[in-house]
Image: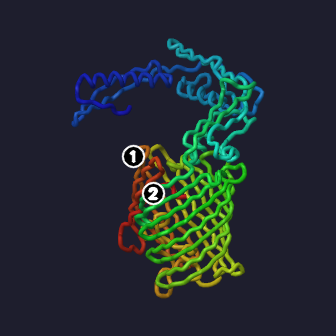
Amino acid sequence: MPSLPYDGKESRLHELILSSNLRLRDALQAYGYYHATWHSKTLPLKNGDAVVQYDIALGQPIRVRNTDIRILGTITEAPSLRQRIKPFPLSNGNILDQVSYETWKDQSLSFLRSRGYIRAYYQRHELLIDKKNDWADIYLWLNSGERFRVGSISIVGAERYPRWFIERYLTFKTGDWYSPDALSVTESNLHDANRFENVQVLGDTAHPVDTAVPVTVKLASLPEQHLKVGVGYSTNIGLNGILYYDNYNMFQRAQHLHVAVQAAQRTRNIGATYTWPIGSTLGSEYIATTSFQNETYQIWSANELSAAIGRRWALADNARKNVNATIQAMFNLEQASYTVSGISDSSFYLYPSVTYRVQNYRNILRPVSGFYVQATAEGASKVWGSTSNFMRLRVRGGWDQMLSPDWGIGARASLGALWLHGPIRNLPPDLRFFGGGQNSLPGYAYESQGPTDAQGAVVGGRLLAVAGIHIDRFITHDWAVGAFYDAGNAFDSFSSFHVLQDIGIGTRWYSPVGPIILDLAHPLIAPRAPAVRVALSVGFNF
């Protein structure tokens, strides 16, 4: 039993023991032991607390003598759906387990109501117990009633947004089987759009038209233009200030303009992204971006002017809220001047890229169970005016799993391969591969590791392989401490692959805005000052 507060008073201890006896009796009876007896012994502790020990004799259990389980109503006309109701967990002769009994009752009723049988009910639900003769009879007659479909759908409010755009967030349509779960996911989708202040998705189950339930979507819009100012910190770029401007309804066509200005210790940039939704699938849109970045890191510095235009296709059903899968095709322009390990160059590239992303976490604000994968393929040719011909592939992924309510494990990996016609100096730093940093090898400075030139200066590589594992111990639901190990590096060939390693410990806080992770990492191979590096990240790093 869990510990109970005790202030050292004898009367309080007596009260707690009586309460524990009642809870113990209820717990034993819930699992069929109505004749259990016990003796208790109180052991005082040195700190003034007390421990109560119980010696329990379970006695003869109550066993199931007879079960009468019936599924009635119109669901009998859908045998494939009827078969999806789990078999009743108790058979004749089993010890009476009322926890399993109640769980099956609730789950079976919820299953029917989530699939259109909104008036499903138990026509009979009786549990008859004869404690004298140690038997129980169970009668459960579940009547599905009529099955209902979604009727007319009305959208009220948010008049400045096109109706077709709002309909993209709906996870149901007229004629679908009515599901409260689908209404709930739709409501959540609309909340996450950052466009609506109040969202209600209501089914009028009290006034169906024949077997069709009218649905009303009630919306109140947020201001279409947002301006945000913030201060943050990232281990990779240092202290930074950020200014965001968003207009979520350009030309009253639900097109989104996002402008970001960032000034940090190691980078300064200004960029704009314009997206305009197309089609009926949530997440499908055209994209145009432009940015200018000035970056200065330990190994390299660069000034980069870039622009891109393309299209994103959503692959996942928006009714599955935890799944986000897209393919994005872009045509990119990049003009850069840069210095890597004291050698200056410039380049110009026009190149297409294709990116596949999938993220499947039960809760993205608490990503402790699930996985993600991101793969990008891109390439340039001198025929298009680029400085060199190249092909580049990069894959990143992660996996997390809870082993128990208190323990979790996870792994991550980054792989990259680059084919380049010419010397590595023809590529700007962002297209080369480096090791180091909070999402790579946190025991080493950001993008400070990789192949070197004849003078021993790091210049970046054509291949990348980094992997890591971690284990977390949860102190509370939202706080955990963890330990991790990483290995890998950037390199030019497997024969010259110099594997770096680090270990570390850290804390994780799963806050209302996402995970906040603070790690202390120590390099095991070729350590350089400082011996311990601090890595801080905020939010889910996809």
| Residue 115, position as x, y percentages in the image | 68, 32
The label number, if any, that marks residue 229 in the structure image: 2
- For label 2, the SS is strand
Q: Secondary structure at mark 1?
A: loop
Q: Residue at x 55, y 56 (%)?
A: 246
Q: Quick one: 342 or 28, which is closer to the camera?
A: 342
- The percent coordinates of residue 136 (x first, y second) are 56, 17
Q: 185 above or below 470?
A: above
Q: Is residue 517 or residue 176 the one in the foreground?
A: 176
Residue 86 seen anywhere in this rendered image of the structure: no
**In the picture shown, does residue 223 fall above or below 32?**
below
Q: Is residue 506 visible?
A: yes
The one nearer the camera, 396 or 177, is 177
Give residue 27's position: percent from left, percent from top: 45, 25
* Location of mark 1 (residue): 475
Quadrant position of residue 240: bottom left
Which amino acid lies under the numbered mark 2 shown in the image of this protein? Val
Q: What residue is shown at x 51% (from left), y 69% (from top)? A: 488
Label 1 is placed on what type of residue? Ile
Q: Which residue is found at the position 52% from the left and 57% from the top? A: 245
Q: Position of residue 302 (x, y in %)?
A: 51, 76
